[in-house]
Image (cartoon, rainbow, N blue to C red):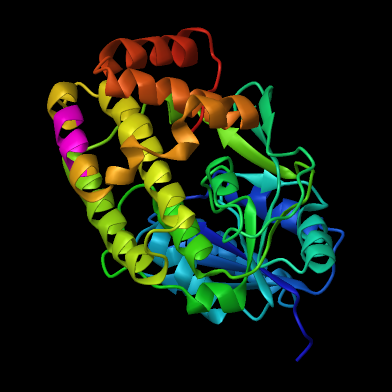
Amino acid sequence: MESVNVSVVVPCYNAERTLPRCIDSLLAQTADSFEVICVNDGSKDSTLELIRAAAETHPELIRYVDQKNAGLWNARWSGTDVARGEYVAYLDSDDYVDETFVQAFLDTAREADADIVVCGFKRIDEETQEVLSVEMDDARPPFRPLDDPGELISINSAAWNKMFKRSLLLSMHRLDNPPQILEDVTLSQLAYLATKGTVAFTGSAPYRYMIHADSMINTITSPQIESIRRALLEIREHFLAEVPESKLLEAFETTVFLHMGIAIPFRVSASDQMDLGRELALTTEYLDRWFPLWKTSRYMKAGYALKHRGAFIKLFIASRFYKWHLMRPFLALYRFVVERLHIEIKW
């Protein structure tokens, strides 16, 4: 059997409309010695038929897993478990990539001997094809999370613009109860905890992240929020066991605040079915009890923000509003900027 350098795992659920574009972009890759693993996660449309046809046409490149619907977390692991590559990259089925996607990952991994490689991405409006922003494409030096954990906070939390050593993924803790939302956050945090090696950056943006018309409708439910709360507590136990009283734990708790204190309330504020005041109170109680370092985190102080700028400026400002109990006007302004001015602000 020919060796494989990179396995690209593509979770697929009801993806008949976008999957052909996604697969075509992988067929156009300049790299050789890679494979594509499509995971059909119980789709109810023609997704499975499309995957089977692609695998029959390109058996040397495409394999697939067909499973009952189990969610994004489990779909990614189903593909990872059967992967043959030294590295595993993830690609969402409604997105697509430039032809250099795999090669940029591999070249960077080899050059930096990296456990994790991050590439940049373009946010693109699906309807107009307008590029809304280009992110994570700046040239950054490699670093070790154990040496400089604050750098982790400045990296977007998605799994889809990252490549991991498969051995690292297989050594990670797997959640007993994976969340219904923020699966990417949980995967990346567990990977950062598990690695003793280097995180490197391609300095390019070959990933095309598509913004759909309903992407602005940030629906969310109480059971979804509760599922991510449970998952983060499970991850916390592993951080406490591995790196108690370390800067890595502090970076993790800061990341928890970023998502639970800012990103989730933003989604709650868009829902007519959710009580924003109640959820903010529950979240504050949750953070204060289980993630107390968020209040004193060096990564949210003015000095750190002014020195490192970028994401830390946004984080510092948002944390001030949160501590001053002014999240309602903050979220209203946030929503106005995103929905009326069409400026994407991501955490």
- Residue 261, compared with residue 115, is above or below; it is above
- Residue 77, compared with residue 156, is above or below; it is below
Please name the residue shown 84% across and 70% down the image.
32
Please name the residue shown 18% across and 46% down the image.
289
| Residue at the farthest bottom position | 1
**Stretch of the chain drawn in magenta:** 280-286
| Residue at the farthest right position | 30
Residue 14 at x, y percent in the picture: 44, 51
Of 286 and 211, nearer the camera is 286
- From where the camera sits, is residue 270 visible? no
* In the displayed structure image, the side of residue 200 where residue 148 appears, left or right: left
* In the displayed structure image, the side of residue 228 where residue 66 appears, left or right: right
- From where the camera sits, is residue 142 visible? yes
Please name the residue shown 26% across and 65% down the image.
177
- Residue 174, compared with residue 292, is above or below; it is below
Residue 275 at x, y percent in the picture: 14, 24
Please name the residue shown 60% across and 54% down the image.
91
Q: Quadrant of residue 320?
A: top left
Q: What kind of secondary structure does the magenta stretch mostly adopt?
A: helix
Of 196 and 51, nearer the camera is 196
